[in-house]
Image (cartoon, grey):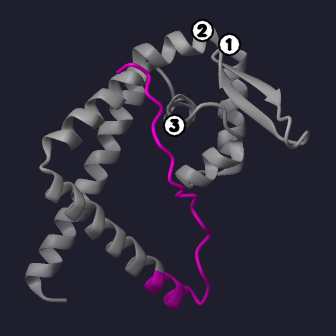
Amino acid sequence: MEEKARAQLNEYNALFREMDFLYGEFARTSGLPEAAFWVLYTVREVGPCTQTMIYQRWAMGKQTINNEVKKLAAMGLLSLTISEKDRRTKLLSLTEKGLHFVRLHIDIVFKVEEKVFEELPEPLREALLEANRRYTEGFRREMTRCLGRAPAPVANEEVGRKNHGL
């Protein structure tokens, strides 16, 4: 790899780790483990959803999400109800206490994300998304080639953020 490309890749990886750290700071400020933070983030963002959707979306282990869901339910932040579509599936929803918690600790993350993203000119936002799409697709292709198998899929459905009056 040429020296300039290597330096750019190192910078990209450092930025990726820094973003992960920054989100982790929001989780630590809320007093939650990161996995629990992402559970509440997702339920706040998309509304009632399943544990499967969460662990696939964030590429986390099933047991990790299951453990955090149990803890959040015990804290009174989440409720689990049986899905009308599939009685084997439980939907996660915020309780009143959970709604109060996310308004204090998760909505601020949405505000920061939206403010910073909207500060970028629209062509730069499009370029950022396109570059990340291509890099991810290429990484997946080369990973499949190296491993001799495709990596487990990560749910990346188009989900719009609900308007929470932010």
Question: Mark 2 Cα within 10 Å, few/some/many (few <14, many 20+)?
Answer: few
Residue, disc 3 = 38
Residue at image x 44%, y 86%?
142
Q: In the depicted view, which residue is nearer to us: 28 or 54?
A: 54
* Quadrant that contains the C terminus: top left
| Local SS, label 2 | helix
The type of residue carrying mark 1 is Gly
The type of residue carrying mark 3 is Trp
Q: Is residue 147 above or below residue 17?
A: below
Q: Quadrant of residue 129?
A: bottom left
Determine contact: label 1, label 2, CB under 8 Å.
yes
Q: Is residue 148 magenta?
A: yes
Question: Mark 3 Cα within 10 Å, few/some/many (few <14, many 20+)?
Answer: many
Label placed on residue 76: 1
Quote the CA–CA distance across marks 3 and 1.
17 Å
Q: Name the magenta segment's main secondary structure.
A: loop
Residue 98 location (% of width, % of height): 58, 15
Residue at image x 68%, y 13%?
76
Residue 128 location (% of width, % of height): 23, 61
Residue range of the region highlighted in magenta in the rendering: 141-166
Residue, disc 2 = 97
Question: Mark 1 Cα within 10 Å, few/some/many (few <14, many 20+)?
Answer: some
Residue 20 location (% of width, % of height): 35, 46
Q: Is residue 108 above or below residue 6?
A: above
Looking at marks 3 and 1 on the same chain, the residue that comes earlier in the sequence is marked by: 3
* Quadrant that contains the N terminus: bottom left
Residue furthest to the right in view is: 87
